[in-house]
Image (cartoon, rainbow, N blue to C red):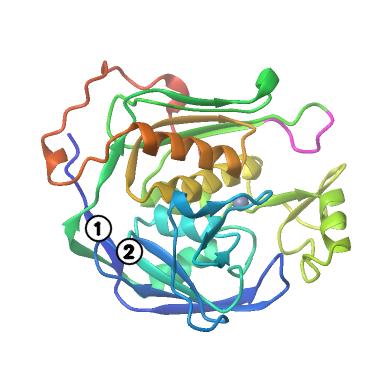
Amino acid sequence: MRAPRRQRTLERAVEMSGIGFFTNADVTISFHPQAEGMGISFQRTDLKSTGPVQARIENVIRKERRTAISQGGVTVELIEHVMAALAGLQIDNCLVRLNAPEPPGCDGSSLDFVQCLLDGGIVEQNAYRDLIVVTQPQAIVTENDSVALSASPISRHGLVITYELDYGPRSPIKPQSFSLEVTPETFITLVAFARTFVAEEEVKYLQSQGYGQRVTEKDLLIFGPDGPIGNALRTRDECVRHKILDCIGDFALIGCDLHGHFRAFRTGHHHNHQIIERIKQTHEIIRAPEYVCFQPHFPLKDLPQEMALQS
Ligand SMILES: [Zn+2]
């Protein structure tokens, strides 16, 4: 079986700047090394004497179309693309400091965060990373099956996410699916660049409410009836790749490594949070070095054909 891996953090602090998509704020965000076992936390430097907000599922608060956390009266929103970059690179311990309620939106993907974090260097720490292995299948299904998310045991160790996106025949976003075994290499090359997408009407509505005033069609994918407005897709299936990026960021809120096969159909952040919460409630955390001798007790079988990586 796969050997347990050691926790990782940054070698040195790094910083970058940009514009907050929702709040229109000029944001400077910095990433700092943290001791083993500390996990990921966000600290608002624009608020006086506030402690860090732990990026854990217990601290998630419900917001539409984004992931937000709150602790001790301090809230940080739209953390998912930063979380995806950290989780995708297997950076387990990091203090994220920012001078606004949200990180910079960048190009709507995790690419700039990945670049910044790689510039900081990644170092292994002494302690091993804890793990949850999905042994009991879980499912979140909404009425009339319009949205579904399941987690099931996997025949080998690792995290596999399969996403199917189908918004119907009238949507300018064509049906697409993608499957990924998440490793730093697959994350960097196959999903980190995938940008968030939004419908033209939704942008108009948000801007009428004062949000996203500085966002243009060059900053992220805004879909009109004929496809992205004033922008080109980086891959034909960029949208579904972005949904997997969001899953990676949201699943990291469990606070340890997670092994299992997740299958998603048209889901969003709220469903991701629900399944992670349920897995955390129903599964034990395997603390290294215990899991050096852990053997999965579900039937071993090969991955189905659909799981082959797509490029
Ligand atoms: Zn996203």
The residue wearing badge 2 is 93
Instruction: Assign a secondary structure to mark 1.
Output: strand
Residue segment shown in magenta = 170-175
* Of the pair 304 and 210, the residue shown nearer to us: 210
Q: Residue at x 28, y 34 (%)?
A: 157
Kind of residue at badge 2:
Asn
Q: Is residue 287 left or right of residue 162?
A: left
Q: Is residue 246 left or right of residue 304?
A: right
Q: Position of residue 70 (x, y in %)?
A: 53, 61
Q: Is residue 152 left or right of residue 222?
A: left
264 shown above or below 73: above
Can residue 180 be seen in the rendering of this structure?
Answer: no
Can residue 132 be seen in the rendering of this structure?
Answer: yes
The residue wearing badge 1 is 7
Q: Residue at x 69, y 18 (%)?
A: 144
Does the magenta segment cover residue 136?
no
> Of the numbered discs in the image, which one, if any, rests on residue 208?
none
267 shown above or below 81: above
* Of the pair 292 and 193, the residue shown nearer to us: 292
Q: How many marks?
A: 2
Does the magenta segment cover residue 173?
yes
Q: Residue at x 25, y 69 (%)?
A: 35
Q: Position of residue 133 (x, y in %)?
A: 30, 34
> Residues under labels 2 and 1: Cα distance?
8 Å
